[in-house]
Amino acid sequence: MTDKVVKLIEDSHEDADLYQQLLEAAGKIKIEYVPARPSVDDYADLAADPETGAVMIDERLGEFAGVDYTGLQVADFLRTLRPELPIYILTNYANEIADDQGESVESILDKKTVRNAAKVYAVRILRAMQQYEVALTQQQRRLKELIDRKLAGELSKEEEAELQQLRAAIERPFASAEIEQERRWDEELQRREEQLERLEKIAQEIQQAVWRGDEK
């Protein structure tokens, strides 16, 4: 059993509870509910979180949450951050997803089928999570090996390129999360500056009104 968890992105807490109970009861797997967020970029922390072993996403997130993106768009975004991460789409409308969609996911799962065969899907997802964990471990071991060779002055040009690629792959999700946090800070700073400007304008209007009163 892996110690990683499946992050379940759903716009319905009730549906999330249902699939969490079904899958956890069917196998040695842990599900963590993630409510729908305002934008696709807001999910960057899932890729950076070392506990994330797989992600399941409801395709029609806008039904209850009112967001303007789909589960497949979230999958595409997460895939750019973690190419090896197992990602699944949950839907009641699998027949409406075009053949040229879904290339970023391991599988598009029909919700009814998952409910009827929860044990089968729990085992499959757990197996994918274990393979992902092995891949990450191998990646980390290779990174350490290359760093040790670099420190010893034994790194070839090909290995130097491999080292840079590995570093980029490992750091990419964290960089995205940091960029998103910086964007939020900028928005908050702008909001406070606008609020301060409004307060200063109000203060000036009050002062001018007082001066006009004194003149009378």
Image: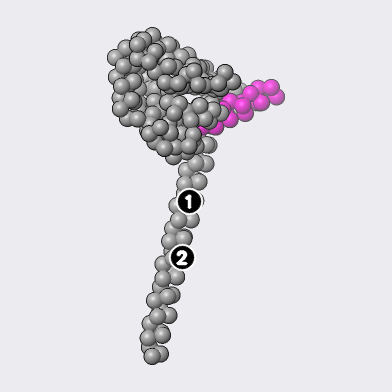
Secondary structure under tag 2 reads: helix
Residue situated furthest right in the rendering? 157
Query: Where's the C terminus, which quadrant?
Result: bottom left
Give me the C-alpha separation between circle 1 and circle 2: 15 Å
Residue 113 is left or right of residue 190, and the answer is left
23 or 189, which is in the foreground?
23
Q: Residues within 10 Å of mark 1 (few under 14, many from 20)?
A: few
Q: Is residue 165 magenta?
A: yes
62 in relation to 189, above or below: above
Can residue 81 be seen by looking at this rendering?
no
Q: Which mark is residue 197?
A: 2
* Marker disc for residue 136: none
| Along the viewing direction, whichever of 132 and 209 lies nearer the viewer | 209
- Whether residue 193 is visible here, answered yes or no, is yes
Which residue is found at the position 39% from the left and 22% from the top? 6
Q: Residue at x 32, y 30 (%)?
A: 13
Q: Residue at x 39, y 25 (%)?
A: 8
Q: Between 132 and 150, which is closer to the camera in this rendering? A: 132
Q: Which mark is residue 187?
A: 1
- Which is more toward the observer, 130 or 93? 93
The answer to the question of whether label 1 and label 2 lie on touching residues, with beta carbons closer than 8 A, is: no
Tell me where residue 158 appears, x and y as whole percent: 69, 22
Magenta-colored span: 157-173
Element marked by disc 1: helix
| Residue 25 image-quadrant placement | top left
